[in-house]
Image (spheres, rainbow, N blue to C red):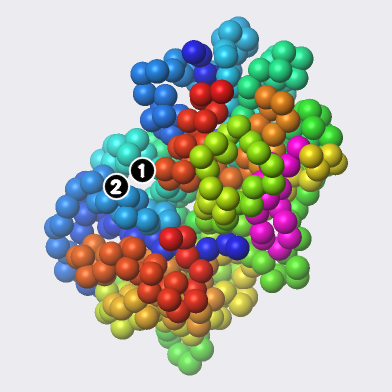
Amino acid sequence: MLKNRIIPCLDVKNGRVVKGINFVELKDAGDPVEQAKIYSDGGADEICFLDITASNENRETIIDIVRKTGKECFVPLTVGGGVRTIQNITDLLLAGADKVSINTAAVKDVSFVKEASKKFGSQCIVVAIDAKKVSDNKWEVFTHGGRNKTGIDAVEFAEQVETNGAGEILLTSMDRDGTKSGYDVELLKLITNKTNIPVIASGGVGTLDHLYDGIVKGGASAVLAASIFHYGEYKIKEAKEYLNSKNVSVRL
Amino acid sequence: MNVTIVDYQSGNISSVINSFTEVAKRKVNLKVTSDIKKIKLSDKIVLPGQGSFKSCVDSLKSINGLADTLKEFAITNNKPLLGICVGLQMFADVGYEEEETEGLGWIPGKVSKIDNQNGKFKLPHIGWNEIEIQKESKIFKDIKNKSHMYFVHSYEFIPEDKSVISATTDYSSKIVCSIERDNLFGTQFHPEKSDKIGLKIIDNFMKL
């Protein structure tokens, strides 16, 4: 039986791990390679790096981190943040990333997803969708860490990226991100029902029950969390044992 | 010992290189190449493969003499070769991803899309799944039945002769996830991404 995945995410800025509250207040807390190794030794099913400085700074820093991590961690590594061109993807994959996560570039032109999945295979193309609730049962896609409204309906966009060859969707609720109040289960349910590719839930985890809700109520194939693992509130193993005790199948 | 990872521009092989390098340490001379002369001098070959069946077969066949050299190595000379993911799928006669494409034809069978049972099963099959060992296999030495391996694929290899199947995994149906025939090995899962247990499989292959 396929197991539900737990994915710790490390937000990286200038080569250091940070985790912001709603992407604003950043705290510095550690070396990404070391953190990734701790997570992979602790049973993380995958590791995710989100380069939050990629938009305007040198990309070499994250590539170097990916290169070092690939030599230490032997579980899948996804890297997102500032992935805009085929060359960006090539560089990250050559450095040792297994998947890349595309956000703004997919929103700007969904055919980039098609081009990327055609060239590298769907298995390594994750599309990150940042969504905010705009009215009852309606969510809109936002970019630039939730600052830019796009007018694009999140559900329609999810269906579109699937058609264009995305292998997975990383769905972040911008309303919940950093709040520790749990995933936006309604949004998750809507998108997991409308698409046939795996959806990774993101944004808002504060307790282990939130992970349970993302999988069982929201239908996510994987749950991503940052701060609850990063600040040591819970170990990956504790999260897995908890889910297992509630009959959610995980890799123990 | 010389182990060669065949680099035929089949997409991302960095993780394969990283994991084999980790296992090889200084004991094994590991090469990453498509140079036919070097491949011929190898003791073992690793054939990775990412992307579609068609794109992998096309890339492999675009390198003059590569397919014949691999066949001579693995089939005629019966030397150890491990195919990973599409690397395994290419052993088949034919694949149906993108369009009908002729494979290497080393193991009779076909590669078709996993039946998602009308959307009940999400595709790609991504993540950790248990393997059910079907027969004793040299690369599964000290690997427990029901061990977790990392998968990412939408197509499955269906061999005609079921005796080549060394493990299956349960996703929609019993998917063939590992084959072994003489010195020819293949895994649908990614040992290079399957943590310590995956490295153990790589180690078993290196030690053959």
Which label's residue is closer to the chain start, 2 or 1? 2
Is residue A58 left or right of A157 when viewed as pictured? left
* Residue at which label 2 appears: A37
Residue B195 drawn above or below residue A205: above
Residue A111 drawn above or below residue A92: below
Q: Callout 2: few (<14), some (14-19), or many (20+) C-alpha neighbours within 10 Å?
A: some
Residue sitting nearer the eye, B116 or A49: B116
In magenta, the rendered stretch is B164-177
Pinpoint residue B53: horizontal percent, then vertical percent.
Answer: 71, 39
Q: Amino acid at mark 1?
A: Cys
Residue A56 drawn above or below residue A21: above
Q: Residue at x 58, y 34 (%)?
A: B139
Q: Amino acid at mark 2?
A: Lys
Q: Residue at x 19, y 65 (%)?
A: A231
Asked whether the viewer can see residue B64, the reply is no
- CB atoms at circles 2 and 1 under 8 Å apart? yes
